[in-house]
Amino acid sequence: MRFLFYTHSLVSDWNHGNAHFLRGVLRNLIRRGHEAVALEPEDAWSCRNLLQDQGPGAQRNFTAAFPDLRSVSYDGDFVHDELLSDADVVIVHEWTEPSLVARIGRTRRQGGAFTLLFHDTHHRAVSAESEISSLDLDGYDGVLAFGETLRQRYQDAGWGKQVFTWHEAADDSVFYPRPEVSKTGDLIWIGNWGDDERSAEIFEFFMRPARDLALKATVRGVRYPDYAVNALSEAGISYQGWIANFEVPLALAENRATVHIPRRPYVESLPGIPTIRVFEALACGIPLICAPWDDAENLFRTGEDYLVARNGSEMTARLCDVLNDPDYAAAVARSGLETIRARHTCSHRVDELLEIVAELGSAQASQTINPTEAVQ
């Protein structure tokens, strides 16, 4: 089949986590013999910031790391109908311009032969409800929501004909253990500052424990204001800025533990949805300690696949546990990796996607009116 993915960006993962998952899904589809192409706006915010931050070399590095992936840039004059007419499945991400979301839906309503899905991997359905409710999804066959609480939000609001839970997952062609790499650090956190959605939590669950334990700690990410960079420095933590996602496994392998600090809108309004960094960290076989979040869907085995700290003091204690007991740390890492390999790789998600497409296709076929019945 021929898949088209409308995305904010495939090329840039600068403050754009959906690119991680999308790359893994496209790669898996291609390995199975399907054709998969991404379409991204020519002046995407993430890509523009990547170029300003890192220069054109970052885009070249993406091409070298993912030679099998194809992305097409479009502007206002781009002719979408030519690509849509040859597609079997079209998946439109929720950061796509609303007018284009509606335009693709109209094409589907007016006889487009492809299955059309809307893909939501963000919290705007609760934090910016009017933006999502105003989208024209009438022509869409279904919605892919990256968590059950988000699926329920769409269903209860009547957004979309059918809504499916489709979690993110680890691209295990990139994220896997590297036991040959020497440990040079104690703790690493990979995450962006952005929008003050977890500022207090970063201080409580990362900066203070790292400072109090005098750990060799590192932060990688973007959009850190000067006061945050200064606070990291005062805590003895190395801030090293943006890191390409395909380089993250090596950075994790060089450290003995990592943490997960979810954004507040997910904790408060969309429980059960982890960031993609949880999947990726566990896939790399590193002990993970999480600030509070509710694994409402039982994606993992809490306390076995990862540890939980309810406050900064417990984070300090949990870090001591894994850093001072190598056997315990190895057992936690092994358990998390086992769950990822059993349930949460991009291959698992492609299996689910193909099942959804087949289900929608069967439903559409069953709704086709038999000419004989029409005469009667």
Image (cartoon, grey):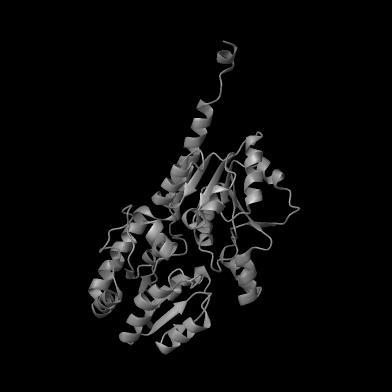
The residue drawn where x is 36% and y is 72% is 259
Q: Left or right: where does residue 345 sit relative to residue 52?
A: left
The residue drawn where x is 54% and y is 51% is 132
Question: Where residue 276 sits: x, y (%)?
Answer: 44, 62
Question: Where residue 166 sits: x, y (%)?
Answer: 44, 49
Question: Where residue 66 sits: x, y (%)?
Answer: 57, 63
In the orientation shown, which residue stands out farthest toward the right? 77
Quadrant position of residue 307: bottom left
In this view of the protein, can residue 123 be seen by the observer? yes
In this view of the protein, can residue 183 be seen by the observer? no
Question: Where residue 184 sits: x, y (%)?
Answer: 39, 83
- Which of 331 and 75 lies nearest the eye of the viewer? 75
Q: Is residue 71 above or below residue 55?
A: above
- Which of 48 and 27 lies nearest the eye of the viewer? 48
Q: Quadrant of the C terminus?
A: top right
- Which of 310 and 317 lies nearest the eye of the viewer? 310
